[in-house]
Image (cartoon, grey):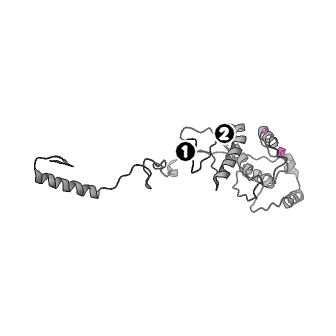
Amino acid sequence: MVSSMGYSRNPISSSRDRRRGRDRRSRSPIRRRGGGGRGGRGDPGSNLRKPRWETKKLEPFKKDFYLPHEAVHNRSKSEIEKYREEKEITLVGENIPKPIFKFDESGFPEIIIKELKKQGFVEPTAIQAQGWPIALSGNNLVGIASTGSGKTLSYIVPALIHISHQRKLSRGDGPIVLVLSPTRELAQQIQTVCDDFGDAFGVSSTCLFGGAPKGGQ
């Protein structure tokens, strides 16, 4: 008689073996192949572990790239206040840099300024004029502005400058900049801006979202 435990000539022993086998199977945990909530083979993040930062030596990196243009530096307090009032710029914080009035005052590489003008931009929008100096100074920034106000460029261009000043990524390194978006459509719009301006720095990017094949992503 063949049992789950192997071949036996003793029927009694074989029956016992079968019962033992059933008992073992009933006690053993269920094993699933992939897709399980506990991280199966199909879960790409199943092998991720929380970094132990106390054991790692982190490389220092530069955050402050902003050097005020002479014209910006020489503007009076009254000129700055008038500009902010006209553009409806409200600020909270300390040691906030003065806004720029023109693209040429940004300190951006010429190739970026050319791309801005090529796309039909005449002058910085309010959030760009005030946001760029803050973001390039290495400070934290929370900017709130209406749709169509140029928010995407207000953080993408500084992000590209920060990326360009860091060492090139090695195999296995994660991204330097991560942009989170509430919708797929907005994520794709942001990706388009990244492509338009990223080429100037030799920076590649990708757009990740659900509901679409992972291959291209």
> Does dot 2 land on a helix, a strand or a loop?
loop
Name which residue lies at 74% across and 53% down.
151
Q: Name the amino acid, label 1.
A: Lys
Which residue in the rendered view is the most extreme toward the front? 1
- Res 193 → quadrant: top right
> Residue 202: image x %, image y %?
68, 36
What is the count of numbered marks?
2
| Residue 132 visible in the current orientation | yes
The answer to whether residue 213 is left or right of residue 65 is left
Which mark lies nearer to you, 2 or 1?
1
What amino acid is labelled 2 in the image? Val
Percent position of residue 166, x then y: 65, 41
Residue 61 lies in the magenta stretch:
no
Which of pointers 2 and 1 lies earlier in the amino acid sequence? 2
Q: Secondary structure at mark 1?
A: loop
Quadrant showing the C terminus = top right
The residue drawn where x is 62% and y is 38% is 168
On the image, the x and y values in percent for residue 136 come to 73, 49
Q: Say left or right for 113 vs 29.
A: right
Q: Which residue is mark 2?
A: 203
The alpha-carbon separation of the residues under discs 2 and 1 comes to 21 Å
Q: Position of residue 59 (x, y in %)?
A: 59, 44
At 23% from the left and 56% from the top, the residue drawn is 22
Residue 126 falls in image quadrant: bottom right
Residue 64 appears anywhere in the view: no
Picture disc at residue 214? 1
Label 2: few (<14), some or many (≥20) within 10 Å? Answer: some
Residue 105 is covered by the magenta coloring: yes
Q: Magenta segment, which residues?
A: 96-110
Question: Crowding near pointer 1: few (<14 within 10 Å), some, many (20+)?
Answer: few
